[in-house]
Each structure stands twice: as structure tokens, then as C-alpha cells.
Amino acid sequence: MKKALFALSASLLAVSLFGEETSKTKPPLEEKISGHELVVGAAKRKKEASRYLTTTPFIYDKHLSPYVGASNLITTHRFLEKSEDYLLRRATAKSSESILAGFARILDLSLVWAPINAVSYLTQRQVFGLGYRQRELRGISSSHFHFKLKVPPYASHGNVGVKMKGSMPTSDVVTYYTAGTESTSIMTDQMKMEWLQSGKIDGRQGSLYSLSALDLIGTASMARGELSNSPTNQLYTNEVSGYIYYMNQLYPRSIINQKTIAKQSLVALIDPFLWYSAYAELFYVVKGEPVDMPMIPFFGGAKFLPSAKLGLTPYGPEYYAQTFWRTNDGNPIYLYYKWGSLSGAHHRGAGIQAPYIFNSDETSIGFTFDWFHQFKAGANDISLSDSSNPNYWTNQRVANTRYYFDYNTFTWQQQITYTSQIIDEKKFYDGFAATLIGTQKISGVPGTSLYAQLGYKTKGYVPGESYKNGLIARGGLAFTF
């Protein structure tokens, strides 16, 4: 905290002393125009300005889902950005393109925003990711939670100590292991939607995006095969390690290993937003401003950018082909198609997010829709309550068993060869999740609206939502910046 205050003070001082003065010359008076033209021109300017505003919600739902975490952390980030902008403007009425002002912004990014972004990333991952699945599944108890900041901040890490409570289906354990990278993936998607509204990227958000976008790559590259204790006591310390272990217990013919997931996760590197966010940090150092986000033009003034990622699910890894759209009115739209295969069977899905598709001066209405065709989680379930029995796994699913001596640990190990069963296509089913989103401006409170999201989902896995069927309900406030 002391370093953050020092960096902010240094930024203010450097910009104040060495920044270039802005021009104080007033623009020449325009020619006299009629009252009607003045009103029409003001309305056009107001509409044009609204195309570059961003609306971000601060919301709540039953289990504090990743959507709540991403929205609230992004909104908080925006408030901090505006607060810093206000302090800088109050401290100096000068522009900020001098060399020493740029150096001050390097300190600002390194000592103020990098720690803020590291804490935001870890909070999303641990509290609203792994913590959400703990709250939702109710089969895992948390013994402790902490995170540690390091220099550079990209070396920061978090830790949740967890234990399973009694009998817990293996599919629930697998779902838990997807929660961390699931939540950071949702964070990146929500950040993209915010950037699409303004058409700009603030460099102060750059490291938050890169940490979240590269989360699965980093987690998979550090995956190891050791348990922190035993399957009945504590879970794997690395989520990808645990995911691989229990997926291979559930689906014997699945070929899931660390190298495969590590290679597949590299698809995230073709995300243009990742490289834009890095450039935005450099642009912020040089200019002190958000950078315009280049997009591919389309019909009717709309623009789009393609993207891709890998997601871990309870029924196997899935590729996402994504497109992010910005309409001529500045409304963001997210479309995706996802697919994957496991043990000879294929799963897929598609969806759309259009949170502000219909707008007026006071009200906005939007929606989300997700469709999925997936393997029924739990169809191959093995309860972990009896897995302390050394013969449990063998008796359940093993065709052949042999023992070998491990020279690394100097112990005898058991090698299991599983039965070659193929997943039954009859165990696949279709489902959906659909919600309506609405905002209503609060009279007398500028830039603030009531926010509500209400919908329903069928039973099945949708990132950031409960596996059970039921209502989806979120509410809070939305702030326009």
C-alpha cells in the first residue's frame, strides 16, 4: 500500500512539474444558427457521445458467481481509474506527454495498477471461481484462503486449502477443478464487452486482462501429478492436475494429459484483445490515454473481432470460436460456438450475449442465450466416500492391474489398465440457459441505473452458472462512465 501511494504521488508530482500545458485559446465563435438547428445539433452530439460511454453493473446473486465477481471487479476498477483521473486533473491542468510524465506513468502502472490488477485477478479466481463452486456444490469445505503479491506482480499467486466432506460424486470434483480457469475466462469476456462499448482500451486494465487470458496456459504448464494429501482428504494443489486425474477415472478411454491440455490452451494466444491490451499499456505510458481498438468493419456500421479460447468442462475440454461485435450505436454483442470430443463422443454448444441491444434515453433491454449438447455429468460417477479402500478403484473399473517399482519414490506403484468402453450417445442431452437483462435510469442520480437479470436454465453445465436447473436471478446497480 505504501508503494502504491508513493507511486501515485510520484505520478502527480512528475506530471505537475514537467507536463506540457494545454492550449488555453478558446475556439472561434460559430456563425449564428437557428434555435431548431441548435437543438438538433445538440441531440446529435449527445447521441454521438453516448456511443463511447460504458455501462458496467455492480450486482449480486445467490452464490456470488463469476459473473458477479467479474462485473463488480471491473466496475470497481473503473471507479479507481476515474478517481485517479480526477486527482491528476486537480493536481495539474497540463497534458501528459513529456518524458518524465511518461516515466511517472511507468511507476503508476508498475506500483499502483499492477498490484491492483493482481489482487483483482486472484479475487476473481479464488473467491468468485473456486469459492463459487464450493458454495454451489456444498461438498467441499474451505480450510483457509490467502494470496501473496510478488514483484513482478505476474508471479503473484493465491491458495485455497480445501477438503472434501464425506461422500462426493467425482463429477462434482471435476466441476470444482474447472472453476478457477472458468472464472478468469468469464472475466476476459466481460472486459471485452466493456471495451466494445467505448471502442477503447485503457492501459491500466492491461495486466488484468493478460493475467486472466493466460490463466489456463499458466496453470496447465505448471501442472504436476502429485496430490497434496490423499483423494479423500485434500484435493490437488494444481487444478489441471486434479482435472486430469479425475477425468481419467470417470472416462477410461479419454486421452487427457498435461501436455495435451497445455498445447490446446495455446489457442488463447491468437486472441487479438490480448495483444491490444499489451499495446494499450504502452500507449498509456506514452500518451496517458486509452487507445482506440481497431476492428474489422461490417455492414451497417457494425464492426467485429474474432477470438478463440479453450475451456475445461466436466465432460472434457472444449474449443470456443468467438466473435465480438460492436453495433453502430456502440452496443456490444458476443457470439460463440464451442465443441469438443471425449471417448469417441462429441459435445457442442452455442450462445449469444447482447446485454444492451435495445436502448432509449432511460431504459435498456438485452438478453443472453446458451444452448448445449453435452454428456450427462455424473453418468459415470464414482463416489469418493469409499475410495480410501486400496482395492476400490480396481474393483470398480479395472480390466488389468500390474505393479512396478518407482525409482523416484522408491516405492511399489500400481498401474491400472481400464476397460475400453465407449460413452453411450444416449447419455447426451440438449439444454439451454436464457436470461433477460434490463436497466432503468434512476431519476436525479446521474450515470446510475437499476439493473436486473432474470432467466431460467435447464440442468447441465454452463460456465459460471449452477449445474442444477432453476432460476437465474441477479440484481444491483449499473454505472455509466
Image (cartoon, rainbow, N blue to C red):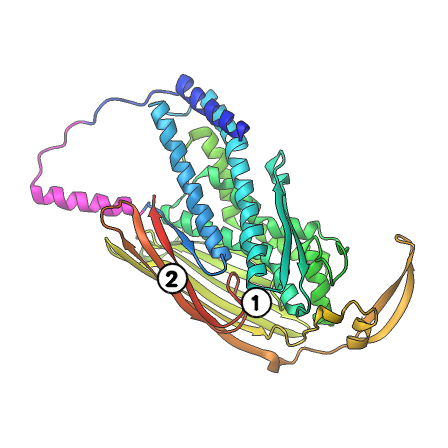
Q: What secondary structure is marked by label 1?
A: strand
The answer to which of 173 and 423 lies nearer the viewer is 173
The residue shown at (65%, 80%) is 424
Q: Residue 453 carries which label?
A: 2
Quadrant in the rendering for residue 356: bottom left
Q: Earlier in the sequence, mark 1 or mark 2?
A: 1
The amino acid sitting under disc 2 is: Gln
Q: Which disc is residue 320 wearing?
A: none
On the image, the x and y values in percent for residue 394 come to 82, 73
Q: Which of marks 1 and 2 is in front?
A: 2
Q: Using the image, determine if residue 23 lies above or below residue 329.
A: above
Q: Quadrant of residue 176?
A: bottom right
Start and end of the magenta stretch? 28-51
Residue 254 seen anywhere in this rendered image of the structure:
no
Residue placed under numbered mark 1 in the picture: 339
- What is the x, y in percent for residue 385? 72, 70
Seen in the picture, residue 238 relative to 279 is either above or below; the reply is below
For badge 1, the amino acid type reads Trp
Quadrant location, the C terminus: top left
Local SS, label 2: strand
Q: How many angstroms separate mark 1 from mark 2 (CA)?
A: 27 Å
The x and y percentages for residue 313 are 60, 64
Residue at 59 percent across and 75 percent down: it is 376
Count residues near mark 2 (Cα–Cα under 10 Å), then give few for <14, some for 14-19, many for 20+: many
Q: Is residue 39 left or right of residue 69?
A: left
